[in-house]
Image (cartoon, rainbow, N blue to C red):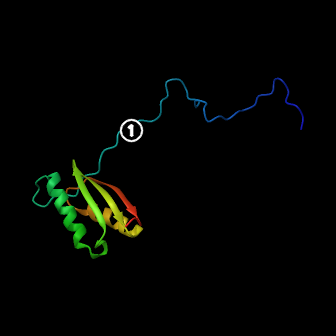
């Protein structure tokens, strides 16, 4: 290989170097609007305690989740699921059931798989 000439331009990559950006550009900011919740029968807004109870009942009604350790917390109509299930499909199933409960805005699924 030949020696690089003094005026030759080379690109050097570094994990510590700041990325090049045009002046004043700080990325894209786009506010996200939450999707509408499934309407609550009767039109009354759901309380967090009421949603917790409804989600727990819906999960208990599905036999495929029997014996799984799932704890539910609701804050601002957002369901947080913690605990453990035996199989990945049970993790996905639990989130889907929680999302289908009227009044739920979103589900944060923190269920671990295989840690019974």
**In the displayed structure image, the side of residue 35 where residue 16 appears, left or right:** right
In the image, 5 versus 66, the foreground residue is: 66
- The residue sitting at 83% across, 23% down in the picture is 6
- The residue sitting at 85% across, 27% down in the picture is 5
Q: Name the quadrant containing residue 42.
A: bottom left
Looking at the image, residue 110 lies above or below residue 115: above
Q: Which residue is mark 1?
A: 30
- The residue sitting at 30% across, 57% down in the picture is 81
- The residue sitting at 36% across, 69% down in the picture is 90
**In the displayed structure image, the side of residue 1 where residue 8 appears, left or right:** left
**Quarter of the image that includes the N terminus:** top right
Looking at the image, residue 82 lies above or below residue 68: above
Q: Residue furthest front?
A: 116
Mark 1 residue element = loop
**Quarter of the image that includes the C terminus:** bottom left
Q: Name the quadrant containing residue 92.
A: bottom left
Q: Residue 64's x, y, as percent?
A: 31, 75
Q: Residue furthest bottom?
A: 63
In the image, 5 versus 90, the foreground residue is: 90
Q: Residue 35's x, y, as percent?
A: 29, 51
Q: Residue 113's x, y, as percent?
A: 41, 64
In the image, 52 versus 96, the foreground residue is: 52
Q: Residue 89's x, y, as percent?
A: 39, 69
Looking at the image, residue 56 lies above or below residue 32: below
In the image, 11 versus 88, the foreground residue is: 88
Q: Residue furthest right?
A: 2
């Amino acid at each position: 290989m030949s020696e690089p000439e003094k005026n030759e331009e080379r690109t050097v990559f570094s994990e510590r170097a700041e990325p090049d950006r045009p002046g004043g550009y700080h990325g894209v900011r786009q506010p996200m609007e939450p999707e509408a919740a499934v309407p609550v029968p009767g039109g009354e807004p759901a309380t967090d305690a009421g949603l917790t109870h409804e989600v727990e009942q819906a999960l208990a009604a599905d036999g495929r989740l029997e014996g799984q350790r799932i704890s539910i917390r609701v804050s601002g109509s957002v369901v947080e699921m913690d605990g453990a299930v035996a199989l990945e499909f049970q993790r996905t199933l639990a989130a889907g059931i929680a999302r289908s409960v009227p009044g739920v805005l979103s589900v944060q699924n923190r269920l671990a798989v295989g840690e019974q």
